[in-house]
Image (spheres, rainbow, N blue to C red):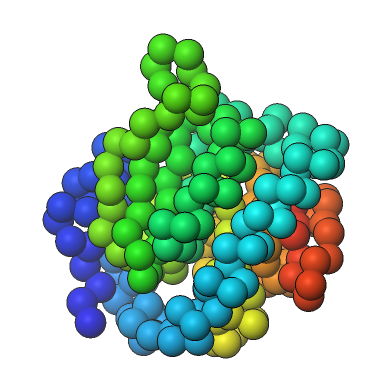
Amino acid sequence: MKTEIKPELEEKLRKVIPGFFDSEIARAKARSLKDLISLENKHFLETWNSSGIPLLYDLKYFLEKNNKSKVLLKRNIKNNILIDLGCGAPPSRLPAMGIVRMLEPSIYIGIDKYFEGQIWEKSPKNRSFEHEFYLENLDKIDALKFTIGLPSNFANFMLNAVCDDYVIKNHRYLKELAHEVHRATLQKGIVFGGLNPKYFEDVGFKRVDALLKDGYDLSILRKG
């Protein structure tokens, strides 16, 4: 599998991510990890509809009922870029966009290895996500490969079931992904969602809120 980004996808992403895969260091790292990036995860596809989508609804419900958590997230995410690693199949977009409307990032970028992603931006009229519009549909791309190409200290992140031993059973992949997410997260930025927090705590995130739900941690972690 080639580790280069498709030119059409790279062009779309550079509209909202200045410097995406600009450095030879990032390209070299993607090539060095091609064995991880090219992994096919049939277990993920089998479990996404049964675990990933309900998890998104759980997260949306959790934020609706826990104003303190919602305020914490919104304070950090509003008017900043939010990246959704492993955004999932189209049925998962409904709860995901409900979460995005609550938190009001300036731009939402959802990517996935097995499904098309999307870029959404706030309406220039009312500057909220009440009447959002999408900028682009995105080709499929692996989460680790995508994150390697991001600038440092760039965005906040949402992950649901992507960084979890139950769904992805390769510890090296999860460790590398957590490391790259930490590098690309804004200073004092936020990572949240249904994930295994130990991978993120190991690279320097601190957990600031959590709810255990059916074996999953719905966690909020802060960089630094």
- Residue 88 in the image, given as x and y percentages of width and height: 46, 62
- Residue 94 in the image, given as x and y percentages of width and height: 52, 48
User: Residue at the location (22% across, 62% down)?
Assistant: 5
Kindly indicate the quadrant of the structure image that contains residue 79.
Answer: top right
User: Between 181 and 131, which is closer to the camera in this rendering?
Assistant: 131
Kindly indicate the quadrant of the structure image that contains residue 50.
Answer: bottom right
User: Residue at the location (49% across, 37% down)?
Assistant: 81
User: Between 140 and 185, which is closer to the camera in this rendering?
Assistant: 140
User: Residue at the location (35% across, 48% down)?
Assistant: 118
The answer to whether any part of residue 152 appears in the image is no
Classify residue 182 as left or right of residue 90.
right
The answer to whether any part of residue 98 appears in the image is yes
State which quarter of the image contains the N terminus: bottom left
User: Residue at the location (47% across, 58% down)?
Assistant: 91
User: Between 80 and 224, which is closer to the camera in this rendering?
Assistant: 80
- Residue 122 in the image, given as x and y percentages of width and height: 44, 26
Q: Is residue 186 above or below residue 183?
A: above
Q: Is residue 4 above or below residue 183?
A: below
Classify residue 24 as left or right of residue 196.
left
- Residue 174 in the image, given as x and y percentages of width and height: 57, 76
Counting labels gives 0
Q: Is residue 51 above or below residue 53?
A: below
Kindly indicate the quadrant of the structure image that contains residue 160.
Answer: bottom right
Give the residue at the far top of this rendering: 125
Classify residue 39 as left or right of residue 190.
left
